[in-house]
Image (spheres, helix red, strand yellow):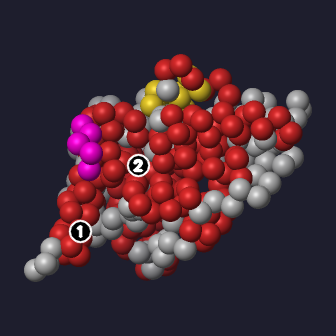
Amino acid sequence: MNIKRLKSLPNTNFYNTIKSYLIYLQFERRLSKNTIVGYSYDLLKYSDYLTLKYDIKLSGNIKLVQIKDFIKFINSKNNLNTKSLARLISSIKSYHQYLVNEEIVKENPSEKINTPKLSKTYPEILTVNEIKKIFNSIDYSKKFVLRDLAIIKLLYSSGLRVSELIEMKLTDIRWEENFIIVTGKGSKERYVPINNSALISINNYLKNLRPSLASKKTSKGYLFLNYRGNKLTRMSIWNIVQILAKESNINKKISPHTFRHSFATHLVQGGADLRALQEMLGHTDIITTQIYSHLDKTTLKEQHKVNHPRG
């Protein structure tokens, strides 16, 4: 969110309600920073356009035809893809529904605007054997191998997001309980179990590599460090995963998030309860988690096709 821009907005009801809505998203809905930035970007374009073209000062004066005009203008100017257009419309509709819920206005003028339906795209999943192949293909002669092995084992064991992994501190590990404390989106904390294999690899890294990387000035208790003693970046994790994937000769597009998807899918295949999985993944809405039950069915169909004699 561009704080300077928000502070410099004109003092009209329209702009003020957008600011209050973004504050609501941040502190009450506790959405992630990136999500709020997206909403902010869309809504400031929206308010600027309606203010300049229609001199809108009161949010209650916005008409359906004006909203449609803005969407048409942005779409023709930027040639938005379906996903970007859906996000834009969703931002506008959510803002107007907020105004109704807060009794600032009586009606939602955007209610009749349809959000484009997005085609379902399922994420890439690794099989259990492919996961084992990555672990077994690691070159133990490399300098940072203990750290890199601990990272991918933790990713697969816990289903962490990369942003959560790089923020992990030494104090976030509960060794005796086989749990880690994860700070997720919106600064929400959750407890996630991890297996012994991941714990052993982390402990090996902590004893035999991290002490040589750590710096009193820069390490600040972060679990995974680079050669300068700083915490790793998202790009660092991506590079580590890419190198390990290449060494294993698996012909799939593999990213750090692939381990999260694989973690969730394999748990569902093993009979895990979706509510428990939702808690482990840190999903706010179980609808997000339900994709993994669909993925499991897709995997079953693929296995049937490949292995059944009349598949």
Q: Nearer the viewer, mark 2 or mark 1?
A: 1
Residue 249, quarter of picture: bottom right
Residue drawn at the location 67% of the way across and 51% of the way down? 148
Residue 164 is at least partly visible in this image: no
Residue bounds of the magenta highlight: 269-273
Label 1 is placed on what type of residue? Gln
- Point out residue 218 in the picture as x, y percentages from the top left corner: 85, 36
Q: Is residue 54 left or right of residue 63?
A: right
- Point out residue 49 in the picture as x, y percentages from the top left corner: 49, 62
Circle 2 — which element?
Answer: helix
| N-term-proximal mark, 2 vs 1 | 2
Mark linked to residue 303 = 1
Closer to the camera in the image, 276 or 137: 137
Q: Is residue 50 left or right of residue 248?
A: left
Residue drawn at the location 64% of the way across and 37% of the way down? 202
- Point out residue 60 in the picture as x, y percentages from the top left corner: 34, 45
- Point out residue 214 in the picture as x, y percentages from the top left corner: 84, 36
Mark linked to residue 74 = none
Circle 1 — which element?
Answer: helix
Location of mark 2 (residue): 263
